[in-house]
Image: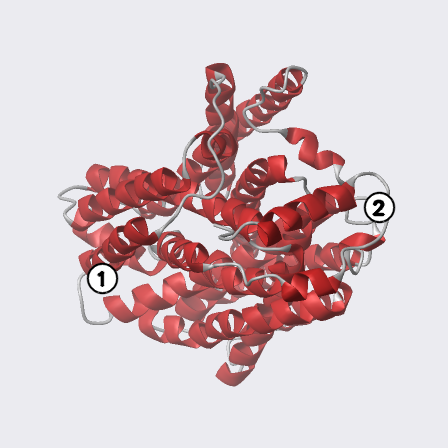
Protein backbone atom coordinates (compact mmCIF):
# COMPACT_ATOMS: atom_id res chain seq x y z
CA UNK A 1 0.00 0.00 0.00
CA UNK A 2 1.54 3.25 -1.15
CA UNK A 3 1.45 6.35 1.05
CA UNK A 4 -0.53 9.43 0.04
CA UNK A 5 1.43 11.42 -2.53
CA UNK A 6 2.32 14.90 -1.32
CA UNK A 7 2.01 16.30 -4.84
CA UNK A 8 -1.71 15.64 -4.89
CA UNK A 9 -2.09 17.47 -1.62
CA UNK A 10 0.12 20.34 -2.70
CA UNK A 11 -1.94 21.02 -5.83
CA UNK A 12 -5.28 20.69 -4.03
CA UNK A 13 -7.17 23.86 -3.15
CA UNK A 14 -6.58 24.97 0.43
CA UNK A 15 -9.43 23.88 2.71
CA UNK A 16 -11.67 26.61 4.08
CA UNK A 17 -11.05 26.67 7.85
CA UNK A 18 -13.42 29.55 8.59
CA UNK A 19 -15.81 27.15 10.28
CA UNK A 20 -13.07 26.26 12.76
CA UNK A 21 -12.24 29.87 13.66
CA UNK A 22 -15.71 30.45 15.07
CA UNK A 23 -15.73 27.12 16.85
CA UNK A 24 -12.31 27.79 18.42
CA UNK A 25 -13.39 31.23 19.63
CA UNK A 26 -16.60 29.88 21.11
CA UNK A 27 -14.81 26.93 22.73
CA UNK A 28 -12.22 29.22 24.31
CA UNK A 29 -14.92 31.37 25.93
CA UNK A 30 -16.99 28.48 27.27
CA UNK A 31 -14.04 26.44 28.60
CA UNK A 32 -12.58 29.56 30.26
CA UNK A 33 -15.56 29.43 32.63
CA UNK A 34 -14.57 26.03 33.99
CA UNK A 35 -11.86 27.58 36.19
CA UNK A 36 -12.87 31.24 36.23
CA UNK A 37 -14.68 30.93 39.59
CA UNK A 38 -11.65 29.73 41.58
CA UNK A 39 -10.57 33.21 42.73
CA UNK A 40 -14.15 34.34 43.41
CA UNK A 41 -14.89 31.70 46.06
CA UNK A 42 -13.96 33.91 49.09
CA UNK A 43 -16.18 36.78 47.84
CA UNK A 44 -19.11 34.48 47.22
CA UNK A 45 -18.81 32.96 50.70
CA UNK A 46 -19.30 36.43 52.17
CA UNK A 47 -22.02 37.64 49.78
CA UNK A 48 -24.18 34.52 50.08
CA UNK A 49 -23.19 33.54 53.65
CA UNK A 50 -22.11 30.01 52.68
CA UNK A 51 -19.14 27.96 53.85
CA UNK A 52 -16.20 26.85 51.74
CA UNK A 53 -17.64 23.40 51.09
CA UNK A 54 -20.84 24.87 49.64
CA UNK A 55 -19.02 27.54 47.60
CA UNK A 56 -16.72 24.94 46.07
CA UNK A 57 -19.80 23.42 44.44
CA UNK A 58 -19.74 26.24 41.88
CA UNK A 59 -16.70 24.55 40.33
CA UNK A 60 -17.76 21.01 41.22
CA UNK A 61 -21.22 21.36 39.65
CA UNK A 62 -19.68 22.68 36.43
CA UNK A 63 -17.30 19.73 36.18
CA UNK A 64 -20.06 17.31 37.23
CA UNK A 65 -22.40 18.49 34.47
CA UNK A 66 -19.62 18.24 31.90
CA UNK A 67 -18.94 14.65 32.93
CA UNK A 68 -22.65 13.76 32.62
CA UNK A 69 -23.37 15.50 29.30
CA UNK A 70 -20.20 14.81 27.28
CA UNK A 71 -20.73 11.01 26.97
CA UNK A 72 -24.02 11.75 25.17
CA UNK A 73 -22.52 14.19 22.66
CA UNK A 74 -20.99 11.45 20.47
CA UNK A 75 -24.50 10.28 19.58
CA UNK A 76 -25.95 13.81 19.50
CA UNK A 77 -23.40 15.29 17.10
CA UNK A 78 -23.99 12.54 14.55
CA UNK A 79 -27.70 13.35 14.41
CA UNK A 80 -27.82 17.15 14.18
CA UNK A 81 -26.22 19.69 11.87
CA UNK A 82 -23.12 21.69 12.79
CA UNK A 83 -25.09 24.96 12.90
CA UNK A 84 -27.81 23.49 15.11
CA UNK A 85 -25.30 22.07 17.60
CA UNK A 86 -23.36 25.36 17.67
CA UNK A 87 -26.47 27.50 18.08
CA UNK A 88 -27.87 25.29 20.83
CA UNK A 89 -24.58 25.17 22.75
CA UNK A 90 -24.07 28.94 22.64
CA UNK A 91 -27.72 29.71 23.49
CA UNK A 92 -27.58 27.42 26.53
CA UNK A 93 -24.22 28.84 27.64
CA UNK A 94 -25.32 32.47 27.27
CA UNK A 95 -28.56 31.76 29.14
CA UNK A 96 -26.57 30.31 32.02
CA UNK A 97 -24.15 33.24 31.99
CA UNK A 98 -26.97 35.78 32.10
CA UNK A 99 -28.64 33.93 34.97
CA UNK A 100 -25.32 33.79 36.85
CA UNK A 101 -24.78 37.55 36.48
CA UNK A 102 -28.26 38.22 37.88
CA UNK A 103 -28.21 35.49 40.54
CA UNK A 104 -30.07 36.65 43.66
CA UNK A 105 -29.24 33.60 45.77
CA UNK A 106 -26.62 30.89 45.95
CA UNK A 107 -28.91 28.09 44.62
CA UNK A 108 -29.71 30.25 41.57
CA UNK A 109 -26.00 30.79 40.90
CA UNK A 110 -25.43 27.05 41.23
CA UNK A 111 -28.19 26.30 38.70
CA UNK A 112 -26.68 28.91 36.37
CA UNK A 113 -23.32 27.15 36.50
CA UNK A 114 -25.01 23.87 35.57
CA UNK A 115 -26.68 25.52 32.58
CA UNK A 116 -23.34 27.04 31.50
CA UNK A 117 -21.69 23.64 31.69
CA UNK A 118 -24.42 22.09 29.55
CA UNK A 119 -23.47 24.37 26.66
CA UNK A 120 -19.75 23.90 27.24
CA UNK A 121 -20.08 20.11 27.16
CA UNK A 122 -21.38 20.22 23.58
CA UNK A 123 -18.92 22.78 22.23
CA UNK A 124 -15.64 20.96 22.86
CA UNK A 125 -16.56 17.66 21.11
CA UNK A 126 -18.20 19.68 18.31
CA UNK A 127 -14.92 21.51 17.67
CA UNK A 128 -12.82 18.34 17.64
CA UNK A 129 -15.27 16.39 15.47
CA UNK A 130 -15.53 19.20 12.91
CA UNK A 131 -11.75 19.62 12.82
CA UNK A 132 -11.21 15.94 12.00
CA UNK A 133 -13.81 16.11 9.22
CA UNK A 134 -12.53 19.35 7.65
CA UNK A 135 -8.73 19.27 7.97
CA UNK A 136 -6.61 16.98 5.75
CA UNK A 137 -4.19 14.64 7.51
CA UNK A 138 -1.08 16.55 6.39
CA UNK A 139 -2.29 19.80 8.01
CA UNK A 140 -3.84 18.56 11.25
CA UNK A 141 -0.87 19.27 13.50
CA UNK A 142 -0.78 22.96 12.60
CA UNK A 143 -4.53 23.40 12.97
CA UNK A 144 -4.64 21.39 16.18
CA UNK A 145 -1.93 23.68 17.53
CA UNK A 146 -4.35 26.58 17.23
CA UNK A 147 -7.09 24.52 18.86
CA UNK A 148 -4.77 23.99 21.84
CA UNK A 149 -5.45 27.63 22.67
CA UNK A 150 -9.06 26.76 23.47
CA UNK A 151 -8.55 23.28 24.90
CA UNK A 152 -5.71 23.92 27.32
CA UNK A 153 -4.96 27.62 27.67
CA UNK A 154 -8.50 28.66 28.62
CA UNK A 155 -8.53 26.65 31.89
CA UNK A 156 -5.05 27.98 32.70
CA UNK A 157 -6.13 31.60 32.15
CA UNK A 158 -9.41 31.33 34.06
CA UNK A 159 -7.97 32.25 37.48
CA UNK A 160 -5.91 35.09 35.94
CA UNK A 161 -8.94 36.65 34.25
CA UNK A 162 -11.08 36.44 37.37
CA UNK A 163 -8.23 37.86 39.49
CA UNK A 164 -8.02 40.95 37.28
CA UNK A 165 -11.80 41.47 37.36
CA UNK A 166 -12.09 40.96 41.10
CA UNK A 167 -9.38 43.49 41.85
CA UNK A 168 -11.80 46.38 41.35
CA UNK A 169 -15.21 44.97 40.39
CA UNK A 170 -17.92 42.72 41.81
CA UNK A 171 -17.88 38.98 41.09
CA UNK A 172 -20.93 39.54 38.84
CA UNK A 173 -18.66 41.27 36.35
CA UNK A 174 -16.94 37.94 35.70
CA UNK A 175 -20.11 36.94 33.89
CA UNK A 176 -21.00 40.40 32.57
CA UNK A 177 -17.64 40.59 30.78
CA UNK A 178 -18.04 37.12 29.28
CA UNK A 179 -21.69 37.47 28.20
CA UNK A 180 -21.38 40.02 25.35
CA UNK A 181 -18.30 38.27 23.98
CA UNK A 182 -20.02 34.88 24.00
CA UNK A 183 -23.22 36.37 22.57
CA UNK A 184 -21.35 38.13 19.77
CA UNK A 185 -19.42 35.00 18.82
CA UNK A 186 -22.64 32.98 18.92
CA UNK A 187 -24.60 35.34 16.65
CA UNK A 188 -21.82 35.99 14.14
CA UNK A 189 -20.77 32.35 14.12
CA UNK A 190 -24.31 31.16 13.50
CA UNK A 191 -24.59 33.52 10.52
CA UNK A 192 -21.31 32.41 8.95
CA UNK A 193 -21.06 28.74 9.86
CA UNK A 194 -21.77 26.08 7.26
CA UNK A 195 -22.74 22.53 8.04
CA UNK A 196 -20.07 19.84 7.93
CA UNK A 197 -21.28 16.38 7.00
CA UNK A 198 -24.83 15.08 7.03
CA UNK A 199 -26.87 14.12 10.12
CA UNK A 200 -27.55 10.41 10.56
CA UNK A 201 -31.01 9.28 11.61
CA UNK A 202 -31.27 7.15 14.74
CA UNK A 203 -32.86 6.74 18.14
CA UNK A 204 -31.24 7.32 21.49
CA UNK A 205 -30.87 4.54 24.02
CA UNK A 206 -32.31 6.28 27.08
CA UNK A 207 -31.12 3.53 29.43
CA UNK A 208 -27.54 4.38 28.41
CA UNK A 209 -28.23 8.07 29.07
CA UNK A 210 -29.51 7.34 32.59
CA UNK A 211 -26.67 4.95 33.41
CA UNK A 212 -24.09 7.45 32.09
CA UNK A 213 -25.55 10.24 34.19
CA UNK A 214 -25.55 8.13 37.33
CA UNK A 215 -22.14 6.59 36.73
CA UNK A 216 -20.05 9.55 35.62
CA UNK A 217 -21.97 12.01 37.79
CA UNK A 218 -21.56 9.97 40.96
CA UNK A 219 -17.92 9.24 40.26
CA UNK A 220 -16.96 12.89 39.69
CA UNK A 221 -19.02 13.97 42.72
CA UNK A 222 -17.29 11.41 44.92
CA UNK A 223 -13.87 12.52 43.73
CA UNK A 224 -14.67 16.18 44.33
CA UNK A 225 -15.88 15.49 47.87
CA UNK A 226 -13.00 13.25 48.93
CA UNK A 227 -10.70 16.26 49.29
CA UNK A 228 -13.18 18.19 51.47
CA UNK A 229 -12.59 18.07 55.21
CA UNK A 230 -15.13 16.16 57.26
CA UNK A 231 -16.95 12.84 57.00
CA UNK A 232 -16.25 11.12 53.68
CA UNK A 233 -18.86 8.37 53.96
CA UNK A 234 -21.09 9.92 51.30
CA UNK A 235 -18.14 10.56 49.01
CA UNK A 236 -16.99 6.94 49.19
CA UNK A 237 -20.54 5.72 48.62
CA UNK A 238 -20.77 7.97 45.55
CA UNK A 239 -17.49 6.54 44.25
CA UNK A 240 -18.82 3.01 44.61
CA UNK A 241 -22.03 3.94 42.80
CA UNK A 242 -20.00 5.73 40.15
CA UNK A 243 -17.70 2.79 39.47
CA UNK A 244 -20.69 0.44 39.28
CA UNK A 245 -22.52 2.88 36.99
CA UNK A 246 -19.56 3.30 34.65
CA UNK A 247 -19.17 -0.47 34.55
CA UNK A 248 -22.85 -0.81 33.67
CA UNK A 249 -22.52 1.86 31.00
CA UNK A 250 -19.57 0.05 29.40
CA UNK A 251 -21.47 -3.24 29.43
CA UNK A 252 -24.52 -1.58 27.85
CA UNK A 253 -22.43 -0.06 25.05
CA UNK A 254 -20.78 -3.41 24.31
CA UNK A 255 -24.23 -4.95 23.97
CA UNK A 256 -25.47 -2.14 21.71
CA UNK A 257 -22.35 -2.34 19.53
CA UNK A 258 -23.53 -5.75 18.31
CA UNK A 259 -26.34 -3.97 16.46
CA UNK A 260 -24.30 -0.81 15.80
CA UNK A 261 -26.49 1.34 18.08
CA UNK A 262 -24.18 2.45 20.95
CA UNK A 263 -24.63 5.82 22.62
CA UNK A 264 -20.83 6.06 22.92
CA UNK A 265 -18.90 3.73 20.63
CA UNK A 266 -16.13 2.12 22.66
CA UNK A 267 -14.58 0.39 19.66
CA UNK A 268 -12.26 3.39 19.49
CA UNK A 269 -10.32 1.80 22.35
CA UNK A 270 -9.38 -1.09 20.06
CA UNK A 271 -7.04 1.31 18.26
CA UNK A 272 -3.79 1.25 20.20
CA UNK A 273 -2.61 4.77 19.37
CA UNK A 274 -5.93 6.26 20.46
CA UNK A 275 -5.88 4.39 23.78
CA UNK A 276 -2.25 5.34 24.39
CA UNK A 277 -2.90 8.99 23.54
CA UNK A 278 -5.90 9.07 25.84
CA UNK A 279 -3.78 7.66 28.68
CA UNK A 280 -1.06 10.30 28.20
CA UNK A 281 -3.64 13.08 28.02
CA UNK A 282 -5.50 11.91 31.12
CA UNK A 283 -2.46 11.57 33.36
CA UNK A 284 -0.93 14.84 32.13
CA UNK A 285 -4.25 16.62 32.71
CA UNK A 286 -4.40 15.20 36.23
CA UNK A 287 -0.96 16.63 36.95
CA UNK A 288 -1.84 19.96 35.30
CA UNK A 289 -5.10 20.60 37.14
CA UNK A 290 -3.73 19.30 40.43
CA UNK A 291 -0.71 21.59 40.21
CA UNK A 292 -2.95 24.56 39.31
CA UNK A 293 -5.01 24.07 42.47
CA UNK A 294 -1.93 23.56 44.64
CA UNK A 295 -0.13 26.60 43.20
CA UNK A 296 -3.16 28.83 43.84
CA UNK A 297 -3.29 27.63 47.47
CA UNK A 298 0.46 28.06 47.92
CA UNK A 299 0.56 31.61 46.53
CA UNK A 300 -2.48 32.84 48.48
CA UNK A 301 -2.33 30.82 51.73
CA UNK A 302 1.42 30.45 52.23
CA UNK A 303 2.78 33.52 50.43
CA UNK A 304 -0.21 35.78 51.17
CA UNK A 305 -0.62 37.03 47.59
CA UNK A 306 -3.84 38.67 46.41
CA UNK A 307 -6.03 37.04 43.73
CA UNK A 308 -4.80 39.66 41.24
CA UNK A 309 -1.12 38.99 41.98
CA UNK A 310 -1.75 35.25 41.78
CA UNK A 311 -3.51 35.60 38.45
CA UNK A 312 -0.78 37.78 36.98
CA UNK A 313 1.93 35.36 38.10
CA UNK A 314 0.38 32.40 36.26
CA UNK A 315 -0.69 34.41 33.20
CA UNK A 316 2.67 34.28 31.32
CA UNK A 317 2.63 30.49 31.39
CA UNK A 318 -0.86 30.33 29.92
CA UNK A 319 0.03 32.86 27.23
CA UNK A 320 3.23 30.99 26.35
CA UNK A 321 1.24 27.79 25.99
CA UNK A 322 -1.21 29.42 23.60
CA UNK A 323 1.41 31.23 21.52
CA UNK A 324 3.47 28.05 21.09
CA UNK A 325 0.48 25.95 20.03
CA UNK A 326 0.66 26.72 16.28
CA UNK A 327 4.46 26.35 16.22
CA UNK A 328 4.20 23.00 18.00
CA UNK A 329 1.62 21.93 15.42
CA UNK A 330 3.91 22.78 12.51
CA UNK A 331 6.77 20.83 14.10
CA UNK A 332 4.44 17.86 14.47
CA UNK A 333 3.43 18.03 10.78
CA UNK A 334 7.09 18.17 9.71
CA UNK A 335 8.82 15.82 12.15
CA UNK A 336 6.15 13.77 13.92
CA UNK A 337 5.24 13.38 17.58
CA UNK A 338 8.37 11.90 19.17
CA UNK A 339 10.48 15.09 18.97
CA UNK A 340 7.76 16.92 20.92
CA UNK A 341 6.25 14.50 23.41
CA UNK A 342 9.52 13.22 24.87
CA UNK A 343 10.94 16.71 25.68
CA UNK A 344 7.44 17.74 26.79
CA UNK A 345 7.23 14.87 29.26
CA UNK A 346 10.73 15.61 30.56
CA UNK A 347 9.88 19.30 31.02
CA UNK A 348 6.68 18.35 32.81
CA UNK A 349 8.65 16.22 35.26
CA UNK A 350 11.31 18.91 35.79
CA UNK A 351 8.75 21.64 36.52
CA UNK A 352 6.87 19.42 38.96
CA UNK A 353 10.13 18.57 40.72
CA UNK A 354 10.75 22.33 41.08
CA UNK A 355 7.36 22.70 42.78
CA UNK A 356 8.29 19.95 45.24
CA UNK A 357 11.13 22.19 46.45
CA UNK A 358 8.90 25.23 47.14
CA UNK A 359 9.46 26.95 50.47
CA UNK A 360 8.10 29.96 52.33
CA UNK A 361 10.85 32.18 50.89
CA UNK A 362 11.22 30.75 47.37
CA UNK A 363 11.97 33.65 44.96
CA UNK A 364 8.98 34.63 42.85
CA UNK A 365 11.00 34.41 39.64
CA UNK A 366 11.71 30.73 40.30
CA UNK A 367 7.99 30.03 40.67
CA UNK A 368 7.31 31.95 37.46
CA UNK A 369 9.97 30.04 35.51
CA UNK A 370 8.75 26.67 36.80
CA UNK A 371 5.17 27.51 35.81
CA UNK A 372 6.18 28.69 32.33
CA UNK A 373 8.18 25.47 31.81
CA UNK A 374 5.12 23.50 32.94
CA UNK A 375 2.83 25.23 30.43
CA UNK A 376 5.32 24.97 27.54
CA UNK A 377 5.80 21.26 28.28
CA UNK A 378 2.04 20.68 28.27
CA UNK A 379 1.78 22.49 24.90
CA UNK A 380 4.43 20.13 23.50
CA UNK A 381 2.42 17.17 24.80
CA UNK A 382 -1.21 18.04 24.16
CA UNK A 383 -1.11 19.04 20.47
CA UNK A 384 0.62 15.83 19.22
CA UNK A 385 -1.42 13.64 21.58
CA UNK A 386 -4.78 15.09 20.49
CA UNK A 387 -3.82 15.05 16.81
CA UNK A 388 -2.40 11.55 16.73
CA UNK A 389 -5.09 10.04 18.96
CA UNK A 390 -8.07 11.33 16.98
CA UNK A 391 -6.23 10.96 13.67
CA UNK A 392 -5.87 7.22 14.25
CA UNK A 393 -9.67 6.80 14.22
CA UNK A 394 -11.83 6.08 11.17
CA UNK A 395 -14.17 8.98 10.28
CA UNK A 396 -17.31 7.37 11.69
CA UNK A 397 -15.67 7.32 15.15
CA UNK A 398 -14.55 10.98 15.20
CA UNK A 399 -17.52 12.22 17.24
CA UNK A 400 -17.30 9.29 19.64
CA UNK A 401 -13.54 9.71 20.02
CA UNK A 402 -14.01 13.42 20.77
CA UNK A 403 -16.63 12.57 23.40
CA UNK A 404 -14.37 9.97 24.99
CA UNK A 405 -11.54 12.50 25.08
CA UNK A 406 -13.74 15.13 26.74
CA UNK A 407 -15.21 12.68 29.26
CA UNK A 408 -11.84 11.27 30.29
CA UNK A 409 -10.47 14.81 30.57
CA UNK A 410 -13.20 15.78 33.05
CA UNK A 411 -12.80 12.61 35.10
CA UNK A 412 -9.01 13.01 35.09
CA UNK A 413 -9.32 16.62 36.24
CA UNK A 414 -11.58 15.59 39.11
CA UNK A 415 -9.22 12.76 40.04
CA UNK A 416 -6.17 15.03 39.98
CA UNK A 417 -7.83 17.65 42.16
CA UNK A 418 -9.15 15.07 44.63
CA UNK A 419 -5.79 13.30 44.82
CA UNK A 420 -3.64 16.35 45.58
CA UNK A 421 -6.12 17.93 48.01
CA UNK A 422 -6.60 14.68 49.92
CA UNK A 423 -2.85 14.15 50.26
CA UNK A 424 -2.24 17.77 51.24
CA UNK A 425 -4.97 17.90 53.90
CA UNK A 426 -4.08 14.50 55.35
CA UNK A 427 -0.40 15.31 55.66
CA UNK A 428 -1.08 18.80 57.05
CA UNK A 429 -3.52 17.44 59.65
CA UNK A 430 -0.97 14.86 60.75
CA UNK A 431 1.75 17.50 61.18
CA UNK A 432 -0.56 19.89 63.06
CA UNK A 433 -1.32 17.03 65.43
CA UNK A 434 2.43 16.72 66.03
CA UNK A 435 2.66 20.39 66.97
CA UNK A 436 3.79 21.87 63.65
CA UNK A 437 2.44 25.35 62.79
CA UNK A 438 -0.51 25.55 60.37
CA UNK A 439 1.37 27.33 57.57
CA UNK A 440 4.38 25.03 57.77
CA UNK A 441 2.11 21.98 57.92
CA UNK A 442 0.12 23.09 54.87
CA UNK A 443 3.32 23.78 52.95
CA UNK A 444 4.65 20.32 53.72
CA UNK A 445 1.33 18.82 52.62
CA UNK A 446 1.65 20.70 49.34
CA UNK A 447 5.16 19.33 48.83
CA UNK A 448 3.85 15.81 49.28
CA UNK A 449 1.09 16.46 46.77
CA UNK A 450 3.52 17.91 44.24
CA UNK A 451 5.69 14.83 44.72
CA UNK A 452 2.74 12.60 43.83
CA UNK A 453 2.08 14.78 40.77
CA UNK A 454 5.73 14.32 39.83
CA UNK A 455 5.19 10.57 40.09
CA UNK A 456 2.34 10.89 37.59
CA UNK A 457 4.73 12.72 35.28
CA UNK A 458 7.11 9.76 35.43
CA UNK A 459 4.26 7.59 34.12
CA UNK A 460 3.64 10.09 31.32
CA UNK A 461 7.34 9.93 30.40
CA UNK A 462 7.16 6.16 30.18
CA UNK A 463 4.02 6.21 28.01
CA UNK A 464 5.30 8.73 25.45
CA UNK A 465 8.19 6.42 24.57
CA UNK A 466 5.54 3.92 23.42
CA UNK A 467 4.01 6.40 20.99
CA UNK A 468 5.10 6.25 17.34
CA UNK A 469 6.60 9.30 15.67
CA UNK A 470 3.90 9.17 13.00
CA UNK A 471 0.72 7.23 12.40
CA UNK A 472 2.22 5.39 9.44
CA UNK A 473 4.65 3.69 11.84
CA UNK A 474 1.83 1.80 13.56
CA UNK A 475 -0.91 -0.57 12.54
CA UNK A 476 -3.48 2.04 13.38
CA UNK A 477 -2.56 4.63 10.80
CA UNK A 478 -2.14 5.18 7.09
CA UNK A 479 -0.17 2.65 5.17
CA UNK A 480 -0.71 -0.09 7.75
CA UNK A 481 -2.04 -2.80 5.53
CA UNK A 482 -5.16 -3.08 7.67
CA UNK A 483 -7.30 -0.45 6.08
CA UNK A 484 -5.92 2.55 7.91
CA UNK A 485 -4.35 4.02 4.81
CA UNK A 486 -7.52 3.49 2.82
CA UNK A 487 -9.54 5.30 5.49
CA UNK A 488 -7.22 8.31 5.54
CA UNK A 489 -6.96 8.49 1.73
CA UNK A 490 -10.74 8.33 1.46
CA UNK A 491 -11.04 11.33 3.80
CA UNK A 492 -8.37 13.26 1.89
CA UNK A 493 -9.94 12.39 -1.48
CA UNK A 494 -13.23 13.81 -0.27
CA UNK A 495 -11.51 17.03 0.82
CA UNK A 496 -9.44 17.36 -2.35
CA UNK A 497 -12.20 16.48 -4.76
CA UNK A 498 -14.89 18.73 -3.32
CA UNK A 499 -14.98 22.38 -4.45
CA UNK A 500 -15.72 23.48 -0.88
CA UNK A 501 -14.44 21.14 1.89
CA UNK A 502 -16.90 22.56 4.46
* Image quarter of residue 473: bottom right
Task: Please say if 192 is above or below 268.
Answer: below
**Distance of label 2 from label 1 (alpha carbons):** 50 Å
In front: mark 2 or mark 1?
A: 2
- Identify which residue is drawn at 16% across, 45% down: 103
- Identify which residue is drawn at 19% across, 71% down: 168
Task: Please say if 55 is above or below 153.
Answer: above
* Left or right for 175, reference 72: left
Instruction: Identify the mark at residue 201; answer none if there is no mark.
Output: none
* Left or right for 201, reference 311: right
Residue pointed to by mark 2? 480
Residue pointed to by mark 1? 177
In percent of width and height, residue 268 lies at: 68, 35
- Identify which residue is drawn at 56% across, 70% down: 326
In percent of width and height, residue 390 lies at: 64, 47
* Image quarter of residue 266: top right
Amino acid sequence: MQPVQSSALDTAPAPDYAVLRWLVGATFIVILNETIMINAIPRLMVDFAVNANAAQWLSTAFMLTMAVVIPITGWFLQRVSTRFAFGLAMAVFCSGTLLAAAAWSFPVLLVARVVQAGGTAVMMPLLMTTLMAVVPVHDRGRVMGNVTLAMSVAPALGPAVSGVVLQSLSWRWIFLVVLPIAGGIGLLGLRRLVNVGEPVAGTVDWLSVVIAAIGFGSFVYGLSEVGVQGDHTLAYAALVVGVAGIGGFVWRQLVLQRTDRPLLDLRAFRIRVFSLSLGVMAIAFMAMLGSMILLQLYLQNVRGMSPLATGLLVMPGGLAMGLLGPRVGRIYDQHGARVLVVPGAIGLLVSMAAFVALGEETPTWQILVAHVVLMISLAALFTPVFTMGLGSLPPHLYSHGSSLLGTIQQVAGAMGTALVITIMTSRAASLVGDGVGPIAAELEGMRWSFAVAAGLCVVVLGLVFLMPARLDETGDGPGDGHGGGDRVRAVEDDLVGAPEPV
